[in-house]
């Protein structure tokens, strides 16, 4: 099979950690030897290339074309219109990618299926492109594209339209599938395929040596994710006054850095919190292995990859009881779920884990149940089924049909 992956969530040379999970998924698909792929990953157009302006400026430095994991990746630019982005972005994405995809077809890459990641706006744009080029589209739902964005009536209507015109849908957890059905999407065409974990990359290390090398001392928590309100780093920091012997490492970058740093000073815990910044996965593995627990205090998650990454390194987790997370944290070997999404909930979770700390070997063994093999086979099966989908014989790069 020949696959065209379409998503705004894909790494690039300017932002190598952006959407790394999408690249990981594709890498495992390619490893089967059963498919070829090219990637069209549009990035926002921005007139300046200096990060002082915004995150868009960082993305402006992405090359138009690059090679990643041995395949071609294209980054056409799409327009982002302030205050109108929610409504216009699907059309802007489709328009920006149309020329790139047309050239790929002209050059002989006659792909069988468009594999779109994130339902809105990416999946909606992919359906427009699928209609235009008469190609079937599979859309993967990842999290906030289903449990947050459909709150907006226009976006919800477009998501339903895209679902009706898709050749198949994938959800990363059963909780998302249930929510998709509640939105009116056809459950018979939704396949739940949870993300796996790279057990070769994320593995136990020499813990004593690594803690010494990284300067990790005492009971240490690790929080990983964008410095964004939805990730709940503030709850973890706010729990530290009740945990006087606990240290916290935060890996990630984002708009809330100064706000979170200020919070550590206000609570008098700045000497126990280290902001590590964004880091590559190989370096992150070392911190997973050195930490005593990973804490994930997100308010919304589909399937949080960081949970399994930490477990694969032998590190148990303390996680908020939301969406797909209970499907990941199912046994004491995996860790504990917080009783509430709050500073008190984090504190209680830490105390519960410390009182019944699991064997790290058992935590690793639990993670080994989540290899990529079954998930990848399921994805390829969905793609094969999609090739038999009767694509409507008309274009849809306008408002018609919505």
Image (cartoon, rainbow, N blue to C red):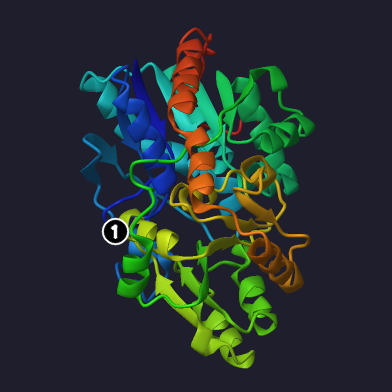
Using the rendered view, name the quadrant where residue 207 is placed.
bottom left
Q: Is residue 401 visible?
A: no
- Residue 206 in the image: x percent, y percent? 33, 59
Query: Badge 1 local density, few (<14 within 10 Å), some, or many (20+)?
Result: some
- Residue 71 in the image: x percent, y percent? 24, 34
Using the rendered view, name the quadrant where residue 27 is placed.
top left
Q: Quick check: 283 above or below 115? A: below
What residue does disc 1 label? 14
Of the pair 42 and 269, the residue shown nearer to us? 269
Q: Quick check: 345 above or below 94? A: below
Location of the C terminus (image quadrant): top right
Of the pair 231 and 341, the residue shown nearer to us? 341
Classify residue 193 as left or right of residue 372: right
Q: Quick check: 382 above or below 272? A: above
Q: Residue at x 29, y 67 (%)?
A: 49
Classify residue 307 as left or right of residue 380: right
- Residue 397 in the image: x percent, y percent? 51, 31
Location of the N terminus (image quadrant): top left
Classify residue 141 as left or right of residue 349: left
- Residue 182 in the image: x percent, y percent? 79, 33
Q: Is residue 304 visible?
A: yes
- Badge 1 element: loop
Count of picture labels? 1
Q: Residue at x 47, y 44 (%)?
A: 92
Q: Quick check: 166 above or below 370? A: above
């Amino acid at each position: 099979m020949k696959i065209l992956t379409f998503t705004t969530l894909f790494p690039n040379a300017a932002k190598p950690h952006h959407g790394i999970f999408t690249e990981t998924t594709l890498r495992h698909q390619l490893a089967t030897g059963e498919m070829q792929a090219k990637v069209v990953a549009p990035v926002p157009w921005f007139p300046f290339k200096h990060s002082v302006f915004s995150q868009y400026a960082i993305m402006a430095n992405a090359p138009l074309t690059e090679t990643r994991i041995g395949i071609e990746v294209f980054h056409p630019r799409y327009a982002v219109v302030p205050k109108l982005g929610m409504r216009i972005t699907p059309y802007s994405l489709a328009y920006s990618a149309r020329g790139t995809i047309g050239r790929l077809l002209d050059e002989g890459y006659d792909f069988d299926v468009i594999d779109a990641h994130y339902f809105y706006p990416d999946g909606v744009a992919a359906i427009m492109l699928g209609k235009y080029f008469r190609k079937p589209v599979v859309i993967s739902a990842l999290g906030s594209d289903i449990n947050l964005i459909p709150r907006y009536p226009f976006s919800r209507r477009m998501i339903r339209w895209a679902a009706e015109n898709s050749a198949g849908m994938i959800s990363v957890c059963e909780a998302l599938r249930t929510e998709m059905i509640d939105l009116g999407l056809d459950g018979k065409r939704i396949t739940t395929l949870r993300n796996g974990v790279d057990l070769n990359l994320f593995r136990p290390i020499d813990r004593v040596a690594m803690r010494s090398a990284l300067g990790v001392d005492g009971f240490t928590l690790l929080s990983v994710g964008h410095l964004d309100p939805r990730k709940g780093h503030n709850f973890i920091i706010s729990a530290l006054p009740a945990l006087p012997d606990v240290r916290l490492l935060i890996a990630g970058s984002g708009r809330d850095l100064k706000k979170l740093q200020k919070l550590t000073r206000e609570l008098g815990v700045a000497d126990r919190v280290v902001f590590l910044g964004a880091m590559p996965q190989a370096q992150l593995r070392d911190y997973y292995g050195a930490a005593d627990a990973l804490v994930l205090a997100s308010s919304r998650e589909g399937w949080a990859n960081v949970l399994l990454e930490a477990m694969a390194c032998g590190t148990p987790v303390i996680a908020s009881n939301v969406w797909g997370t209970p499907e990941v944290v199912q046994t004491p070997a995996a860790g504990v779920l917080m009783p509430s999404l709050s500073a008190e909930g984090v504190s209680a979770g830490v105390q519960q884990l410390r009182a019944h700390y699991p064997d790290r070997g058992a935590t690793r063994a639990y993670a080994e149940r989540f290899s990529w093999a079954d998930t990848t086979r399921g994805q390829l099966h969905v793609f094969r089924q999609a090739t038999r989908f009767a694509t409507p014989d008309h274009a849809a790069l306008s408002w018609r049909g919505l």
